[in-house]
Amino acid sequence: MMSPGSFVAVLLAAALVAIASPPAPAQEAGGEDAQAQQAPVEPTPESLRAKYPPRVEEMRPTPGWAPQFLRPTSPAVRETTPLRVDWADNQLDAGPVTFGVPFPREAVASAENIRLLTANGEVVPCQVETTATWDGPDGAVRWALISSNLRRGADYSVEFGSDVARAATEGVTVAETDEAIVINTGPMQATISKVRGTLFDEVALNGQTILTPDAAASEMPVVIDAAGNRYPAGGAADGLQVSIERSGPMEVAVRREGWYTGADGTRFCQFITHTYFYAGES
């Protein structure tokens, strides 16, 4: 018969054995394959999309949500919008001004049905270009870009509609060849070379030449690096590209893109210039 003290000693020994030897993990049917299935799996985009499918809901605007400007309107016959010119700190009495005007949907069919008037109803020479349309490229005018020469303190209005027809305006003229672009604003005639890197190749003001091709070559735009190396604006052989960006009776824009290139052909950096010419200006 076991004494109480011996019984307690046996229990204590059994507890120590259990602590020293933790139970081995249970093996499920399938052996190693079962353990591999229990290993954590890294989520993938495909598994996440399968678990959390995206919800696509139809967007239905609330009735009356659209601003008045976006709602279709009846085509305008002859309407006017007042124009206020803010000259800010500019001290000029007159000068070229370019501005954008938005139009309601279906109000104006073409830029030809837009013109500029003085407060007395006199037609002001202007250039109008459509920059955005409603409902596709063949839709009504949404935004128009207007260029004109305006006077400080004068009141103007934009007139538009099917009964409005803008007359042809004489202003800036452009002549282009394979070697140059010649722009005539009236008082000034400027030649921009497509071959050389000069900013202007020749300029005449009121019929008198003030910049000759030889003088332009001696004043070629140039970049000088820290070591004193010179990189003049390169010509056609160095990748010069000259194009007309905008062309109209009131404004012409010419774009030049090329490289400042050393005598050994090393390119230092690229240049892009935009030069604007306005009717009656020099």
Image (cartoon, rainbow, N blue to C red):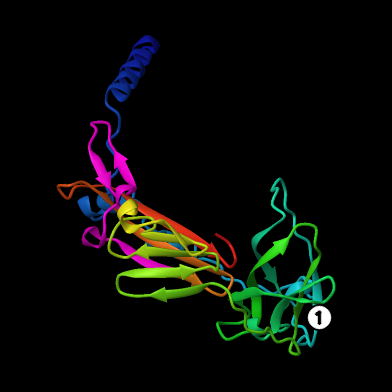
Question: Who is closer to the viewer here, 184 or 18?
Answer: 184
* Identity, as a three-letter code, of the amino acid under mark 1: Glu
Residue projecting furthest to the top: 5
Quadrant holding the C terminus: bottom right
* Rendering quarter of residue 112: bottom right
* Rendering quarter of residue 108: bottom right
Question: Who is closer to the viewer here, 190 or 66?
Answer: 190
Residue 119: give x, y in percent of width and height. Answer: 84, 70
Q: Residue beneath label 1, please? A: 79
Question: Who is closer to the viewer here, 231 or 75?
Answer: 231
Residue projecting furthest to the bottom: 163
Residue 257: give x, y in percent of width and height. Answer: 35, 59
Quadrant holding the N terminus: top left
Q: Secondary structure at mark 1?
A: strand
Task: Say whether residue 217 is left or right of residue 94.
Answer: left
Residue 90: give x, y in percent of width and height. Answer: 69, 48
Which segment did they paint magenta?
Answer: 217-244
Q: Is residue 98 above or below residue 111?
A: above
Task: Say whether residue 148 is left or right of residue 198.
Answer: right
Q: Is residue 138 magenta?
A: no
* Rendering quarter of residue 18: top left
Question: Who is closer to the viewer here, 262 or 12?
Answer: 262
Residue projecting furthest to the right: 120
Query: Residue at image x 76%, y 57%?
Result: 152
Q: Is residue 30 visible?
A: yes
Q: Is residue 105 visible?
A: no
Residue projecting furthest to the left: 264
Residue 40: give x, y in percent of width and height. Answer: 34, 48
